[in-house]
Image (cartoon, rainbow, N blue to C red):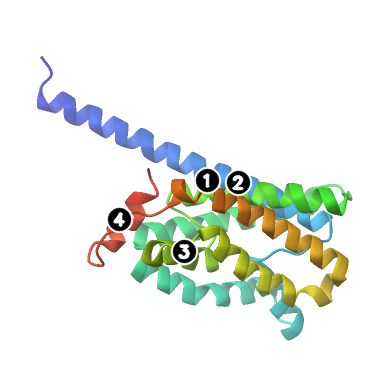
Amino acid sequence: MINNRTIERQFHVNEVVVRVKKILFILFGCLLTASGILFLRHGHLVTGGTAGLALSLAYLSRLPFDLVFFIINIPFYVFSFFRMGMKFTLATICSISTLTLLTSIDHFLPAFSISIWLSSILGGSLIGIGVIFLFKNGSSLGGAQILTLFLQKRFGFNPGYVNFLFDFIVVLISFYLVGITKGLLSILSIAVTSFLIASYKNQISLPKGNKKNYQVESTMALNK
């Protein structure tokens, strides 16, 4: 006969397994996203999100990219803390740190070039799949992705469309860096990313709930 202590022990084991799987899936998502970014880099294309915006602003202001990127994300971190909860915010900060570490490996890789068409499609696909893994496991890459999840929860907006709109504006700002041709292929890349996110919106959606328990539900929903 199974006693309460055995049930509690089994529940604890299952909880640990779930948490470990979440961490592994988040790491895998960061790895896919980092690979996609590297493909875009070596195709000399630009990306969207706060990373792309920080790159453009760093070029205009001549400030270090890391400093601009950090400053841009501060209001999003504050917003995430109050609207998405502590766990989601910490997971997002860890994901951004992991992504930064993984993309820095590029400095140790041999120089190589890649077709801009392949760079656009493959890079966009890897980033899209990576972001889906992050969303489904209670994390994000900060910036507009936090706002994307909030708007999906609050107003039912399609996360893929919101993501594309923000990235599209950022890439347009970056046109002067890469030219029209590569700029258009950069837009194709973010379109691929956003299409994948939009296709999986039901799997990454946050459940509806009242405002009072929003912080708890926003974290729990992404575990499903």
Q: Count numbered badges in the picture.
A: 4
The numbered mark, 2 or 4, whose residue comes first in the sequence reads: 2
Residue 217 versus residue 75 in the image, above or below:
above
The numbered mark, 3 or 1, whose residue comes first in the sequence reads: 1
Q: Is residue 212 left or right of residue 58?
A: left
Residue 19 versus residue 149 in the image, above or below:
above
Please tell me whether mark 3 sits on a helix, a strand or a loop: loop
Please tell me whether mark 4 sits on a helix, a strand or a loop: helix
Residue at label 3?
Answer: 157
> Which x, y percent locates residue 193?
64, 54
The reply to whether dot 2 and dot 1 touch (C-beta < 8 Å) is yes
Is residue 106 visible to us here? no
Mark 3 to mark 1: distance in Å?
A: 19 Å
Mark 2 to mark 1: distance in Å?
A: 6 Å
Disc 3 residue crowd, few under 14, some 14–19, many 20+, Cα 10 Å: some
**Which numbered tag is attached to residue 129?**
2
Residue at label 4?
Answer: 217
> Which x, y percent locates residue 115?
88, 50
Mark 3 to mark 2: distance in Å?
A: 19 Å
Residue 28 versus residue 186 in the image, above or below:
above
Q: Amino acid at mark 1?
A: Phe
Residue at label 1?
Answer: 133
Mark 2 to mark 4: distance in Å?
A: 23 Å
The numbered mark, 1 or 4, whose residue comes first in the sequence reads: 1
The reply to whether dot 3 and dot 1 touch (C-beta < 8 Å) is no
The numbered mark, 3 or 2, whose residue comes first in the sequence reads: 2
> Which x, y percent locates residue 113?
89, 50
> Which x, y percent locates residue 198?
55, 53
Is residue 29 visible to us here? yes
Q: Amino acid at mark 4?
A: Glu
Q: Is residue 129 left or right of residue 222?
A: right
